[in-house]
Amino acid sequence: MSAVHRATTWDISDSENESDDIKASSSCVILDQNTSINESNTSPPSARAEDSSISADGVKISGRRRRREEVLEELEARTAAKERRREEKDKLKEEKLQEQQRRKEAAERLNLLKPENFIKSLTAHIHAVLLRDAGCDVLLRNLDGLQWRNRIENQDLPNSIRWTQQALQTEDEDKKEVIEEDQVLMVISHNELEDMVMSHKTVTNQSALIGDMCEGSESLLNHLYKYLTRTAGKVVTILVMISHQQRSGSWGEDDLDLHLNRQHLDTEELLVHLQLYWNVAVHFLFGWQEVTDHVVALTKALSKRPYKALCGDPDLGFCMDGSWSAGVRVDRDGHGLAQVWTRQIQQLNRVSPAMAKAVTSAYPSPSLLLKAYEELPSEEERRRLLADLTVVGGAKERRVGPELAGRVHRLLTSQNPHLLLD
């Protein structure tokens, strides 16, 4: 045991203790350097930022002040974004209100353009000369009974009736503008027509025949020519009143045109001249009642014109919207041919869809029906081939009948292109 103890215990000299002290001190120096390095690396970034944050002028800026500025900038950005969203929301709301207002104004305008409302804005201007005839009271009473506006006044064209309308009021206009219609009626008697014929006949040169007049002439024809020359775009219609005495006397209603053509060639020449050169039509009416009916019909037509123009009538007004007007679509595989065959039968007069369906269900194609016709020996059996087919649909069962069976037979077998199927 003592030997072992002597082996484990060493005798350390003084020199060895000094060397150990030197090593320990050097190691302590090294640890102190590493510790300082680690402390510098593990120091917080804010502290480093505070130490390194220096302005361009060389003045150091604290981290707390910089963070306050960033918060203020972020707050200002949020406020600006919130304000932009509020402005966009207000703008959308304003646009929505404007759109609603435009729709409301459009609906009101459309309502005003309807014939029953637009006719209230029309005013019939009647020349004062027409009041000399006692029969004009019929016209005035009818206009007053319909509660239509009318006015008695002197006009450029004698014996005339014209119409004006009040334009729709807009926001910028305080007063409504008056628009004059292009339709004008000229009511004259048969004697005045004869005076116009004589005035036209006295003009002998060719230049006057196309519209030039003598300066001294003051007939109704001269006034008419001046009016048409001065006002372009007017459509004048002359209403010639024939009294009941003339109607029951020498002229009848049926032979009036024949009388004009054979006995009054000068009158016919004047009518042709007015129609070709001035686009003036002449109508012969019997009494003020027929004149009143013509005025009422023309007033109603003028009241319907704006609404029809707004709606935009199609070019082919008789073609209604629907699946039938577009035809039947036939695919390349033949899908749709059965419906085409049904439509062909249905095009015949007095053929319902149920009757056409009964024929095409028994014979799905024209070739099968033609083949069935060829197999029958007599013509009578061929005509009555489809007569006993049952028509499905309706309150009770019924047959196709011999009449339709015969028409279908003539449709498929006749060689005459001008043959009537009915």
Image (spheres, rainbow, N blue to C red):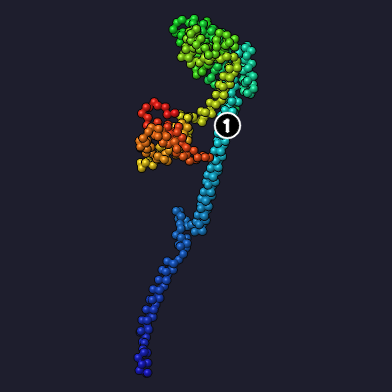
Q: Look at 39% across and 40% down and name the residue there.
A: 364
Q: Residues within 10 Å of mark 1 (few under 14, many from 20)?
A: some
User: Farthest residue toward the bottom?
Assistant: 2
* Mark 1 secondary-structure assignment: helix
Estimate the x, y position of residue 241 in percent, counting from the top left. Answer: 57, 13
Towards the viewer: 69 or 240: 240
Q: Look at 37% across and 37% down and name the residue there.
A: 372
Estimate the x, y position of residue 22 in percent, counting from the top left. Answer: 37, 79
Towards the viewer: 352 or 285: 352
Residue type pointed to by label 1 = Asn
On screen, residue 402 versus residue 244, left or right, reads: left
Residue 212 appears in the figure: no
Q: Look at 37% across and 78% down and name the residue there.
A: 23
Estimate the x, y position of residue 147 in percent, counting from the top left. Answer: 63, 24
Splitting the image into 4 quarters, where does residue 48 fall?
bottom left
In the picture, which quadrant includes the N terminus? bottom left
Residue indicated by mark 1: 111
